[in-house]
Image (cartoon, rainbow, N blue to C red):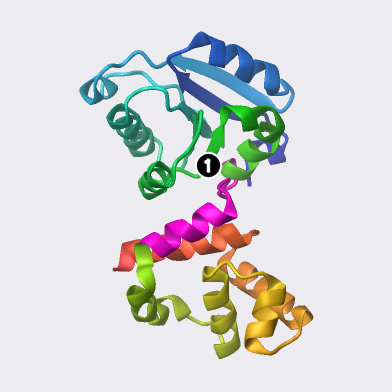
Amino acid sequence: MSENSRGHRLKVCLLSPHPLVRSEFERLLPEKQFQFTFKVLSATAPADIESMAIPRAAVYVVDAQSSQQLIHALIENILDRNPKSRVLVLAAKHSDSGTFDFLRLGVKGLLTYSQAEEQWPRALPLVASGGYWVPRAVLSRFVESILGTRKTAAVKGKLAGNLSRREQEVMDSLMLNLSNKEIASKLNISERTVKFHVSNLLSKHGVRRRADLIVMHFQEHLVTA
C-alpha cells in the first residue's frame, strides 16, 4: 500500500541537473497528494554519487539527462541506501536497450517528458505500491530478449510452482503478450474462462496487472538462474 493510500502525501524526490524540470514537475503534482523534494544532480562522475546527500522518499524520479554510466550509478546507489524505495526514470525518449538496462537495475517506471502531464498522477502511486509503469509491449520484448526461445522451456519448471496445468498454459500465453481472445483461441476455451484463470494468476502472485506478472516472473528467473 502506498503512502498516499493511507491518508498521507506520497514522498517523491526528483533528481535532475535542470531547475526547469523541477518547475514543471512541481506544476504537475497536486500538493495535497504529493510531498515533493528536489535534488540537483551536480555529480559528473559515478564516484561522486557515493558522497551525495539524497533525501529519503518513497519514489525517486531520476532525470536521465546525464551520462548513462552516471545515471546507472545513481540508481544503484539509491536502491542500496533505500531498498524499499522505487525508482522511475524520466527521459526525452526510451530505447529498448536503455529500457532493458534500467529494468535490470530495478527501475519500476519509465516515462518521457511528453507523457508527464498526463501520466504522473497515476504512475507515481502505482510505482510506489510496487507496480510497474512500463508499456506492455516493451515488457514483452524485455522478457523475450532475456529468456529467449530456448531458455523458456528450461524456466517453465521453476516458474510453475503451485499452478494448475491450465494456469501454466495461460501463463505461457501471457508471456507471449497474447490477448484474452488470442489465448482463448489458442487453448480452445472461452474468453470468460481465460479471464478466470488470469484473475487467479494475478491473485496468487499478489499483483494487479499482467505487466507486473510478466516482470515478476522474469525477475524470479534472474534470481534463481
- Residue at the far top in the pictured view: 19
Quadrant of the rendered structure where residue 75 is?
top left
How packed is label 1: few (under 14 Cα within 10 Å), some, or many (20 or more)? many
* Residue beneath disc 1: 109
**Does residue 54 sit above or below 121 in this rendering?**
above
- Residue at the far left in the pictured view: 47
81 relative to 5 in the view: left or right: left
Q: Which residues are magenta?
A: 128-145
**Does residue 109 sit above or below 191 in this rendering?**
above
Q: Say what secondary structure mark 1 lies in.
A: strand
**Does residue 46 sit above or below 223 in this rendering?**
above
Is residue 129 part of the magenta span, yes or no? yes
**Residue for point 46% across, 66% down:** 217
50 relative to 115 in the view: left or right: left
Is residue 27 part of the magenta span, yes or no? no
Q: Position of residue 72 (x, y in %)?
A: 32, 34
- How many numbered tags mark residues here? 1
- Residue at the far right in the pictured view: 192
**Does residue 190 sit above or below 68 in this rendering?**
below
Please state which of residues 201 and 189 is positioned toward the viewer in this rendering. Answer: 189
**Residue for point 36% across, 62% down:** 146
Q: Amino acid at mark 1?
A: Gly
- The C terminus lies in quadrant: bottom left
Q: Position of residue 175 (x, y in %)?
A: 52, 69
Q: Position of residue 18 (x, y in %)?
A: 47, 12
Quadrant of the rendered structure where residue 31 is?
top right
**Residue for point 46% across, 80% down:** 161
Q: Position of residue 191 (x, y in %)?
A: 76, 79
**Residue for point 67% across, 76% down:** 182
User: Magenta segment, principal secondary structure?
Assistant: helix
